[in-house]
Amino acid sequence: MIDNMSIAIDGPAGAGKSTVARLLAEKLGLLYIDTGAMYRTLTLSVLREQLDLSDEDRITKLAGALNIKLSNQPLDNKVFLNGEDVTEAIRQPEVSRNVALIARMPAVRQIMVNIQQSLAEKGKVVMEGRDIGNKVLPGATYKFFLTASPEERAKRRYRELIEKGYEVSLNDLVRDITERDNTDRTRLTDPLIPAPDAIIIDSTNMSLVEVTNNIIKLIAAGNNGGTSE
Ligand code: CDP
Ligand code: CDP
C-alpha cells in the first residue's frame, strides 16, 4: 500500500502537524519532512546576521546559500545549520514572531519549494507545512488539513514553552499565533489554504492519538478526498 505513498499535512501553528506527522511516519515507515523548520532556520540566520527584515534581496541570497540539514527520521527531528545543531534555537519565540515575514517573500519560497520537492522525489514521505497540498506536493496520495481553535493552539504552545523554561504569557501567545496565521493566510504567494482535495480535521477536542488513528483509518479505507470532522 505504501509504495511511493506521500502524505501532505498542512494547517496553522499548533494544530498538531509535526507531532501527528512524526507518529504517522513512524507507523507507516515513511520519511518525515518538517518544512517549517527550513523557514525557521533561515529566519534564525537572518536574525543572527542582523539583516533588515525588509531587505528581500539579501534575505533571498542568504536563503540560496543556506546550508541546512534536516534529519528525516521521525524519532530524530534534529536540524543543523552549517553543522551547528539549531533544533532548539529555531523554536525560540523571537524566531516564531518573525518567520512569517520572511516566509511570505516569493523568491525565498521558490528556493524552499525546490528543495522540498527534491527531498520528496523518491516518494514515501510525510511532509508538513502550509503549502504542501497546494504547491509542494499537489499530487500527494493523501492530504490532510489539521486545525484547532486559536485558544487551544496557543495553550498547546504555552505548555511547551513553559516546560522549556521560557517566560511567556498565554495572552501574548494567542496574539502572536493569530497574527502569524493571518500573515500566512493572506500572503500573495502560496497562502495557507486547504487544498481542494484535503480532508479537514478539527483537533480542538481530540488527543494526538485520536487524530493519528483517525488519519490511519482514513488511509486504510483509501479515503483521499472529501471532508471529515
Ligand atoms: O510549528 P509551527 O506550526 O509553529 O510553525 P512551523 O510549521 O515551524 O512554520 C513556521 C512558519 O514558517 C509558518 O508560520 C509559515 O510562516 C512558514 N511556513 C511556510 O510558509 N510554508 C511552509 N510550508 C512551512 C512553514
Ligand atoms: O506542528 P504544529 O505547530 O501544527 O503542532 P505541534 O508542534 O505538533 O503540536 C503543538 C503541541 O500541541 C505539541 O506539544 C503537541 O503535543 C500538542 N498537541 C496536543 O496536545 N493535542 C493535539 N491534538 C495536537 C497537538
Image: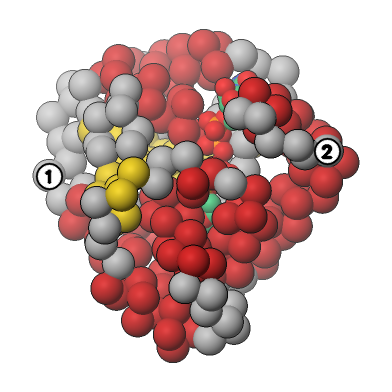
Three-letter amino acid code at the position of disc 2 = Ser
Q: Is 34 left or right of 26, judged from the image as shown?
A: right
What residue is shown with label 1? Answer: 122
217 or 112, nearer to the observer: 112
Q: Is residue 182 above or below residue 22?
A: below
168 or 200, nearer to the observer: 168
Which element carries disc 2, helix, strand or loop? Answer: loop
- The quadrant of the picture occupied by the C terminus is top right
Q: Position of residue 26 (x, y in %)?
A: 29, 19
Please tell me which residue is depicted at 26% across the width and 38% down the height of the picture.
Answer: 71
What residue is shown with label 2? Answer: 169
Residue 112: give its label: none
Q: Position of residue 134 (x, y in %)?
A: 43, 56
- Could you tell me how far apart the alpha carbons at marks 1 and 2 are, in whole angstroms? 43 Å
Q: Residue furthest right?
A: 171
Three-letter amino acid code at the position of disc 1 = Lys
Indicate the quadrant of ligand 2 in the picture.
top right
Q: Quadrant of residue 200?
A: top right
Residue 202 visible? The answer is no
Q: Is residue 217 above or below residue 60?
A: above
Tell which circle, 1 or 2, labels the residue nearer the N-terminal end.
Answer: 1
Q: Residues within 10 Å of mark 2 (few under 14, many from 20)?
A: few
Q: Position of residue 28 (x, y in %)?
A: 26, 19
